Image (cartoon, grey):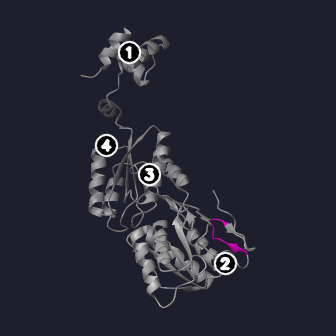
Amino acid sequence: MGVTIHDVARAAGVSVASASRALSGRRKVTAEVAERVTRAATELGYRPNAIAKALRDQTTGTIGMIVPGIGNPFFTTIVESVEHQLQETGHDLLLCASLYTPEIEARRLNTLLARRVDGLIISPCDFEASAPAVLNAARQVPLVQVDRYIEGGGADWVGVDDDSALAQAVDHVVAGGARSVVFVSSRLMNSSARLRLAGFQLATARAGIASLPPLLGEFTLAWGFEAGQALLAGDALPDAVVCGNDEIAVGLLRALRLGGVRVPEEISVVGFDDVGHAAMCDPPLTTVRQPVEEMAAEVVRLLNQVRVGDPRPAQRIAIAPRLVVRQTSRPVTRGVVTAGAGGTMTGDGQEDKETT
């Protein structure tokens, strides 16, 4: 049997009530009693009963988080950033993956609710099918969506400004001489895929260049490779490819390399996220950097503000991204290019160097 509060009180020579007050900090005791109790607890290796504390305080000190999959480097990075932010609030993180399946996602939500988490952070895997379970959870505990959101919103959301991101990517390849661009991304099952396609179409229309039919599959290396093979099998390569994430871009680069296509001499490639191996692939990938640390900080800030049943409209916070120019895109050949709302690029023949 472990050390109990009774053992600590006996060793400190105080009552159980005094020992409990000293350790909880909820009611004052004298400095001398606090010092004796703390020393006794340390020497005995006492650990408070978390379950009893949760019942007493109606909190568990835990936040649940659900992402579609931890194999995707972006979700790994956002989880790490959220956990870092939660350390400042004294909460621990309980992580689950929905495996891109709404039914599993609903079960994970129920599991976390059964564990009485103090709040939930979720990146819903499906724009429509995830909505019932997410809305049900939001009626029970504070909930914030990150990166992706459900149809109709329904809860606070923090993500990236996809219109700005795609404007920067498209403006960049156009400034490098591209006149035809194709978008390779995921099928439109989630809000990120929908927003990025819409942002790409808006950017190419504004730039007045040919937007070829998009290639839509999955946010994976395998799909990027398959899409690259499809481009190689076509009548002619586009001048540039903008990808929905870095995983797709890296897979596509491999297919192009195996097909004997030189990047960026024959075709420019731009990714999205700037996490994982974007800087380490060959050649290093030009990509749009998601401000993950800022996103995580906003998620935790909002989570601390959300109150269940609050009638206020859900907040949506889109944080500006920034283009990171590396070696898979051609240098600027004309004009000064405004890269959407998220930043600028100079057009004097040399791009700004990688931004950190």
Res 79 label: 3
| Residue matched to label 2 | 175
**Pointers 1 and 4 in contact (C-beta within 8 Å):** no
- Counting residues from the N terminus, which is met first, the one under dot 2 or under dot 1? 1
Q: In which quarter of the view is residue 181 placed?
A: bottom right
Q: Is residue 209 visible?
A: yes
- Counting residues from the N terminus, which is met first, the one under dot 3 or under dot 1? 1
For the record, the magenta segment spans 336-343
Label 1 is placed on what type of residue? Answer: Ser
Q: Position of residue 201 (x, y in %)?
A: 53, 79
Work out whether residue 288 or residue 201 is closer to the camera in this orientation and state it.
Answer: 288
Residue at 54% of width from left, 52% of height from top? 293
Label 2 is placed on what type of residue? Answer: Ala
| Residue matched to label 4 | 116
Q: Is residue 146 visible?
A: no
- 10 Å crowding of disc 4: few (<14), some (14-19), many (20+): some
